[in-house]
Amino acid sequence: METEVPAILRAREAIAPERFTFHSSRMRMTRVTPEQLKAMDADSDRCAVELSDARVDVLGYACLVAIMSTGLGYHRAAEERLYSRTVENAAPAPVVTSAGALVEGLHTIGAKKVVLLAPYMRPLTRTVVDYLTHEGVEVLDYRALEIPDNLEVAAHDPGRLPGLARALDHGDADAVVLSACVQMPSLGAIEEAEQLLGKPVVSAAVCTAHQMLRALGLPAVAPGAGHLLSGAYAETPPAPGAAIGG
């Protein structure tokens, strides 16, 4: 989140007049386990209040699996709760979760069947698969890279991802999720993977940037970030709900 979303926004600045600042508040988590993910999510209220102190215009919750492992459809409750924290702080700001953004990004491009890569251990990856299935997206095939250490997830070479995606059974897929995790870098490989696979390719970070731009009421377009941000979906309405509607 702290590298790829700013990179997407900086790329957009080359073609559009808006300028952005980026602020972050951290929820602690070192190993990607259900216990640490639960504790991390509990810390999100504090972060929402801290960021709203800066009077930011939109908040992004940057851990997909922390949301998805809490329960089916939980991104809606999390977005509404965190939006309420900003309201209570007299600084209302729409909230986008990476979990909800991935769901909305796939719906936006009309992807009903996907394949995906995730850095998580297999049980957590199955949680992601089940969550997407609940949201109307069928996962035809997936690969769990089984990297438990969060820093090692961030250090994973994105250059490996197109080849790993090609090894999936993607023939009938409408789209490919190159990274179902905002911690695992993939931005530099998105367009290479699209050319290699001949399909739209998204990531949790790309979808998050798309939904954040739409929550701001700005055209969701940025060069170098694949089909979703190509301009074809620049004016797609943001996800419905109290958190986005203000």
Image (cartoon, grey):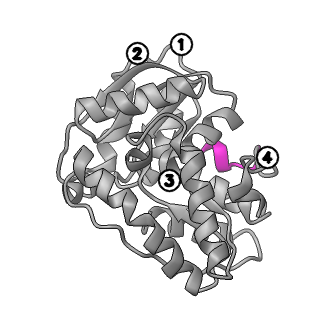
SS type, badge 1: loop
Residue denoted by label 2: 169
Indicate the position of residue 6 as horizontal and vertical percent values.
52, 70
Residue occupying the point 22% across, 46% down? 33
Residue denoted by label 1: 172
**Pointers 1 and 2 in contact (CB under 8 A)?**
yes
Name the kind of residue labelled 1 in the image: Asp
- Callout 3 crowding tier (Cα within 10 Å): few <14, some 14–19, many ≥20: many
Determine whether, in the image, residue 43 is placed left or right of residue 204. left
Indicate the position of residue 52 as horizontal and vertical percent values.
58, 80
SS type, badge 2: loop
Specify the quadrant of the image occupied by residue 118: top left
Q: Nearer the viewer, mark 1 or mark 3?
A: 3
Name the kind of residue labelled 3 in the image: Ala
Q: Does residue 22 appear in this view?
A: no
**Pointers 4 and 3 in contact (CB under 8 A)?**
no
Q: Quadrant of the N terminus?
A: bottom left
Specify the quadrant of the image occupied by residue 105: top right
- Callout 4 crowding tier (Cα within 10 Å): few <14, some 14–19, many ≥20: some
Question: What segment is highlighted magenta in the picture?
Answer: 225-232
SS type, badge 3: helix
Please state which of residues 127 and 222 is positioned toward the viewer in this rendering. 127
Q: Is residue 173 above or below residue 243?
A: above
Residue denoted by label 4: 236
* Pointer 2 or 4: first along the chain: 2
